[in-house]
Image (cartoon, rainbow, N blue to C red):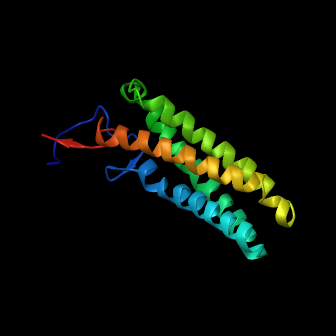
């Protein structure tokens, strides 16, 4: 017989009880952070390899970020008790802002050479990472303080 658990804040979009949103979120975090590091490397060296790395990392981060957003939105909109939590709306809106910043950053990175990174590409990469730090903190609060996506066994 399966164990009993409280379902109120359990993830709606899950595989074997594991929230899909939480599985996908590390990919855009890593990609956008590495894009910032690649932009800094390009700024310091002018080696076009770093520009290419950054552009591809941004694209991969956007793809996985959109996937994470879809599954996060399923949980967010399917569960009114999640939407009612104080960090939920800033977390969702902040992640949307991070994706929009990354999208425009990827467009900026399509320019040739130096102008693809300095100053706007580097600025947008830094802003994206800063927004992610805040939304990551809020997401951690949703999980660790409010128990969102966590199965509770009786």
Residue 103's x, y, as percent? 71, 49
Residue 79's x, y, as percent? 40, 29
Q: Is residue 47 above or below residue 5?
A: below
In this rendering, would 128 be left or right of 21? right
Residue 135's x, y, as percent? 49, 41
Q: Is residue 45 above or below residue 82?
A: below
Residue at horizontal 48 percent and vertical 57 percent from the top: 26
Which one is in front, 141 or 69? 141
Which one is in front, 7 or 55? 55
Residue at horizontal 68 percent and vertical 45 percent from the top: 101
In this rendering, would 29 be left or right of 150? right
Residue at horizontal 32 percent and vertical 39 percent from the top: 10
In this rendering, would 139 be left or right of 31? left
Identify the image quadrant of residue 60. bottom right
Q: Is residue 78 above or below residue 48?
A: above
In which quadrant will I find the C terminus?
A: top left
Residue 84 visible from this viewpoint: yes
Residue 92's x, y, as percent? 52, 35
In this rendering, would 137 be left or right of 96? left
């Amino acid at each position: 017989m399966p164990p009993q658990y409280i379902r109120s804040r359990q993830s709606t979009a899950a595989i074997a009880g594991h929230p899909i949103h939480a599985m996908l979120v590390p990919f855009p975090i890593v990609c956008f952070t590495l894009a910032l590091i690649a932009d800094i490397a390009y700024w310091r060296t002018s080696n076009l390899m770093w520009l290419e790395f950054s552009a591809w990392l941004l694209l991969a981060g956007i793809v996985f970020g959109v996937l994470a957003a879809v599954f996060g939105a399923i949980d967010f909109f399917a569960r009114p008790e999640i939407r009612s939590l104080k960090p939920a709306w800033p977390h969702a809106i902040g992640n949307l802002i991070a994706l929009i910043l990354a999208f425009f950053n990827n467009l900026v990175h399509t320019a040739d050479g130096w102008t693809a990174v300095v100053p706007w590409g580097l600025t947008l990469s830094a802003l994206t990472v800063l927004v992610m730090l805040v939304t990551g903190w809020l997401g951690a609060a949703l999980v660790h303080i409010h128990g969102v996506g966590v199965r509770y066994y009786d």
